[in-house]
Amino acid sequence: MIERTLSIIKPDAVAEGHTGDILADLEKAGFKILALRMTRLSQAQAEGFYAVHRERPFFPSLVKFMTEGPIVVMALECENAIARLRELMGATNPANAVEGCIRKRFATSIERNCIHGSDSPETAAVELRYCFSTLDLL
């Protein structure tokens, strides 16, 4: 089944110059990039995007991290995109990630884990609308 998902190259990976390598990994894995934009989140935007985590103890540090520098947001499409992206990204904690995955190669900690990917079709739909207009995704 062809799916769409959202991915974000986070501020740590952008600052370290890993954007090109991550994009290349995505394309090699068969993802079609439907839309891509470099941007910088305001505090309000980051709080809105991660609102599901508002009550979690890591929420303030997550918002601070996601606003510290530019990010690259992208809409991706391929067969089983959500599961395939999550496998390509690897475990949230790079110490537990398998060799060769994006987080094992580029993340430095569970909090500075270089890439985001939607975790379900429902989340992907919300996140894609948060970052892109309908016109962006035609």
Image (spheres, rainbow, N blue to C red):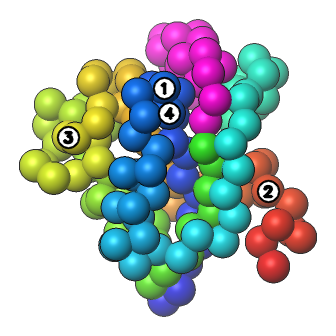
Secondary structure type for disc 4: helix
**Numbered disc total:** 4
State the image coordinates of residue 127 (x, y, percent, origin top left). Answer: 68, 52
Q: Is residue 7 above or below residue 31?
A: above
Q: Is residue 84 above or below residue 7?
A: below
Q: Looking at the figure, which quarter contains the C terminus?
A: bottom right
User: 138 or 117: which is nearer to us?
Assistant: 138
State the image coordinates of residue 118 (x, y, percent, origin top left). Answer: 52, 54
Mark 1, residue position: 15
Residue at image x 38%, y 22%?
A: 111
How many C-alpha atoms fall within 10 Å of the one at disc 3: few (<14), some, or many (≥20)?
A: many
Mark 3, residue position: 104
Mark 2, residue position: 132
Q: Examine the structure image and report whether residue 61 is included in the region drawn in magenta.
A: yes
Given the image, on which type of amino acid does mark 1 rest? Ala
The reply to whether the C-beta atoms of the residues labelled 4 and 1 are less than 8 Å apart is yes
Mark 4, residue position: 14
User: 86 or 15: which is nearer to us?
Assistant: 15
The reply to whether the C-beta atoms of the residues labelled 1 and 2 are less than 8 Å apart is no
Q: Is residue 83 above or below residue 111?
A: below
Q: CA distance from mark 1 to mark 2?
A: 23 Å
Please state if 80 lies on the left or on the right of 128 as rendered.
left
